[in-house]
Amino acid sequence: MIENWTKEFIIQRLLAITLLIALFVLCFQVVQFFIVPALWAAILAYVTFPIYNFFHEKVKLSPNFSAAIMTMSISLIIGVPLVIGVFVLQQEALSLISNLVYRIKVGYLDVPDSVKDLPIIGQQVKDVLWRINKNPEGTLEAFRLWVQSHLYYGKVAFDVVFSSLAKLGMALMTLFFFYRDGTSLVRQIRQALRNIIGNRIDGYIDSVGTTTRAVVYGIGLTALAQALLAGVGYYFASAPSPILLTIVTFIVALIPFGTPFAWGAISIWLMSQGHTTEGIGLALWGVLVISWVDNLIRPIVISGATKIPFIIIFIGVLGGLTAFGFVGLFIGPVVLAIGLAVWREWISQHKNEIFAQQEILLSDPQARPPSRSREREPEPEQNTNDV
């Protein structure tokens, strides 16, 4: 009877586990597209939640109205620079294409002499320019045929842009509910994890919160400061479209040590166009001013707040970027912070076992193992009388 009951019990458990796994897989398939937007919304909501509390608790606004104010503010902060950047990029692209087509028509397409004098590709560039300028109409026709044959890539690019905009809209919509119901959601998650892991989960959640806030502030403030300083350099160096370049620099600056690739490329481009003084000045501005911001703000804000070595944060940022994409900039350090918190807790719990023998040896010299000289038995003395 017990054996039959045990078999039935095992079968029921296996069926329940199978159904749970199937339900989890189906749920994952449904929400797969919304995972990244939800992560972005969760990060933004957690970092800016004190401002929401100000409207809700200090100003005494309703949760819905406070969440709406915060969501609209975040939407404007993200949307206005995005619209300006797209508009400026469109104008620059149209101007570049119009100028390029005009130069091809008149047969005067040229590049700086510094490019022509390159040791390996310089002669090839000269040959291509000579063929283009020799037959402008044929070049334009070949360009039209090439564009028509590669329209598929334009559709792919359009799909990527549309998907990104859809994810952005989903993130902003989810942000509203995270503001309004965030406290209740965190309590439920904390209780669910406490049921599985125990009370130690409180320390892990605190570590996640501290690391997330420090990483977002450290990376965001550093990128913003570097982009503004780079924008000042672009303006005084007479770089084209300094506002657009500032926005691009901000995006690149989110990646650790990526800012030099932004202002360095502009500096090289200025020098290649004959603006040697402006290019050298921008390079010096980048080395002496912009780069020092990264060395000051990021380690102080991140490592100072989290008590985590900066090398771990650095590995987490780059590793998260590689594994999870752009949102991995914030997920990677959080994952490593949880791992470090588990490691420190394990060391703390087993400290007595690990260091007990060492403490005994240090406190009681008699407990030390005898040296090799004492362990060696004395050799028997040889009797010279027998000889």
Image (cartoon, rainbow, N blue to C red):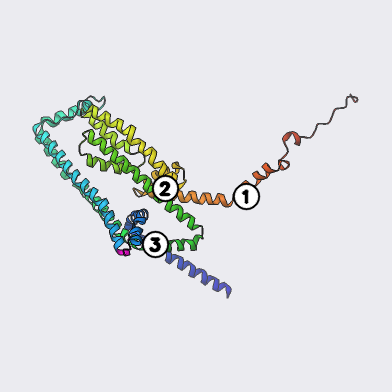
Residue in the image at 35% along x and 60% along y? 58
Q: Determine which residue is flagged by label 2.
A: 333
| Residue 63 lies in the magenta-colored region | yes
Marks 3 and 1 in Cβ contact (< 8 Å)? no
Residue in the image at 45% along x and 68% along y? 16
Give the residue type that dot 3 points to: Thr
Reading the chain from its start, which is encountered first: label 3 or label 2? Answer: 3
**Start and end of the magenta stretch?**
59-64
Give the residue type that dot 1 points to: Glu
Quarter-wise, where is residue 374 in the image? top right
Q: Residues within 10 Å of mark 2 (few under 14, many from 20)?
A: many
Q: Secondary structure at mark 3?
A: helix
Reading the chain from its start, which is encountered first: label 1 or label 2? Answer: 2
Residue 353, disc: 1
Instruction: Give x and y (percent) for residue 64.
Output: 30, 64
Q: Determine which residue is flagged by label 3.
A: 183
18 over 128 or under it: above or below: below
205 over 2 or under it: above or below: above
